[in-house]
């Protein structure tokens, strides 16, 4: 295709040069020759870029995975690795329904040594997760699952591969244009490809929104708490308002030009939670107060390393699961062993600052309000 493009451009230049009735000066002809040479060289280079990316995405994916581990370093934290095993196993069983290639190319994955908040899924179903992601999210499995679901959704749609092609392609074309021999520009192509991974380059705002939407589907079907998507972004909002170092690192990763704002992502996930609950469960984004069937139930206390708002989305997620499963109808309420149950599901562990009796009474009121039949 690029060779044909070069021919068309050459033809266009020829028509322009001779339609004026004048011959092209020698100096201009030399410049044109350089441009055309760069175009042809660039087309050859891009052909090799695409061939290598295809190779890394298929038969060379295990070798590529080894390169990723060598570049990023492997972290052997037992808790993080065990958690990653569980998450990838559960998500894989769901994602294979949407991306059948996962059956033939099961994910390769590892925890790396980077302390920043990040993870990525790249060519060949290769996944790398920063140890910093586990630490920032306080090893909360449901929240980490949502982040990984988002990254795996990018992989399903080939977003990272397409982004790498664009970035590496421009590097190659510039290198070829600046040199007389295209081969020199390709000498370190593998390094160039790896250098553009995990940077979110080439990922657009629509891609980000689609990946968030898919992550909710993957995680809900895998049995993770459906409030965890909103909780992740509430935690990020909390972190960036309290920790300047963390703020700089996170804001650098989530550029507002190609990523939704943290608050918008939280609110979108919260609205999706409400829809999932058959429009029964809602969270007030300002206070964290949870409502069921339009009846105000309560605000969870800050606990378990979570702010009141972050915890509210987790509690609401458990409630949403109940009302999703029962079609948005009434659910029996009871307080037992320090936990509040809706039906058979524990939705709140009563801790210091939680008034268990008040929660139960308000949930009973919600049941007595006009409910769906």
Image (cartoon, rainbow, N blue to C red):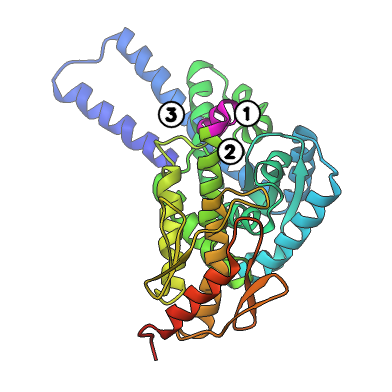
Left or right side of 75 for 325 = left
The residue positioned 55% from the left and 78% from the top of the image is 322
Are discs 2 and 1 less than 8 Å apart at CB?
Answer: yes
Please give the label number shown on residue 186. 1
Residue 271 quadrant: bottom left
Q: Mark 3 and mark 2: span between their CA atoms? A: 15 Å
Res. 153 visible in picture: no
Q: Position of residue 297 (x, y in %)?
A: 47, 68
Extreme residue in the bottom direction: 373
Up-down relation of residue 219 to residue 129 (above or below): below
The residue located at (82%, 51%) in the rendering is: 79
Q: Secondary structure at mark 3?
A: helix
Disc 3: which residue:
39
Residue identified by numbered label 2? 49
Q: Quadrant of the N terminus?
A: top left
Q: Is residue 119 visible?
A: yes
Between marks 3 and 2 in the image, the one whose residue lies nearer the viewer? 2
Picture quarter containing residue 221? bottom right
Measure the alpha-carbon separation of dots 1 and 3.
Answer: 15 Å
**Residue closer to the observer: 77 or 97:** 77
Q: Earlier in the sequence, mark 2 or mark 1?
A: 2
Left or right: 176 as drawn, with respect to 89: left
Q: Main secondary structure of the magenta part?
A: helix
Q: CA distance from mark 2 to mark 1?
A: 8 Å
- Between 47 and 362, the one lying in front of the other is 362
Looking at the picture, does residue 329 appear above or below residue 316?
Answer: below
Which residues are drawn in magenta?
Answer: 242-252
In-front residue for pair 189/46: 189
């Amino acid at each position: 295709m690029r060779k044909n493009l070069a021919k068309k451009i050459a033809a266009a230049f020829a028509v322009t040069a001779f339609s004026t009735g004048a011959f092209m000066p020698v100096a201009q002809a030399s410049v044109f020759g350089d441009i055309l040479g760069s175009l042809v060289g660039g087309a050859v280079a891009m052909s090799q870029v695409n061939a290598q990316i295809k190779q890394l995405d298929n038969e060379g994916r295990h070798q590529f995975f080894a390169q990723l581990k060598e570049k990023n370093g492997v972290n052997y934290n037992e808790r993080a690795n065990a958690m990653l095993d569980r998450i990838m196993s559960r998500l894989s069983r769901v994602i294979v329904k949407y991306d059948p290639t996962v059956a033939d190319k099961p994910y390769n994955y590892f925890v790396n040594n980077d302390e920043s908040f990040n993870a990525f899924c790249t060519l060949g179903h290769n996944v790398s997760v920063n140890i910093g992601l586990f630490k920032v999210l306080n090893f909360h499995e449901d929240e980490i699952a949502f982040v990984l679901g988002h990254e795996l959704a990018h992989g399903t749609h080939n977003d990272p591969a397409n982004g790498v092609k664009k970035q590496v392609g421009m590097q190659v074309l510039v290198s070829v244009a600046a040199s007389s021999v295209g081969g020199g520009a390709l000498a370190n192509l593998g390094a160039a490809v790896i250098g553009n991974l995990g940077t979110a380059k080439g990922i657009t705002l629509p891609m980000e929104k689609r990946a968030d939407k898919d992550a909710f589907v993957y995680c809900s079907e895998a049995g993770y708490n459906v409030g965890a998507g909103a909780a992740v972004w509430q935690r990020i909002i909390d972190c960036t308002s309290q920790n300047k170092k963390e703020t700089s690192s996170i804001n650098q990763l989530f550029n507002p030009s190609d990523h939704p704002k943290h608050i918008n992502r939280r609110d979108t996930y919260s609205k999706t939670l409400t829809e999932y609950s058959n429009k029964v469960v809602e969270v007030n984004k300002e206070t964290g107060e949870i409502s069921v069937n339009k009846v105000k139930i309560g605000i969870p206390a800050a606990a378990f390393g979570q702010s009141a708002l972050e915890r509210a989305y987790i509690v609401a997620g458990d409630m949403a699961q109940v009302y999703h499963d029962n079609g948005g109808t009434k659910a029996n309420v009871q307080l037992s062993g320090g936990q509040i149950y809706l039906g058979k599901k524990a939705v709140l562990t009563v801790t210091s600052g939680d008034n268990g009796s008040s929660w139960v009474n308000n949930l009973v009121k919600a049941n007595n309000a006009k409910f769906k039949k």
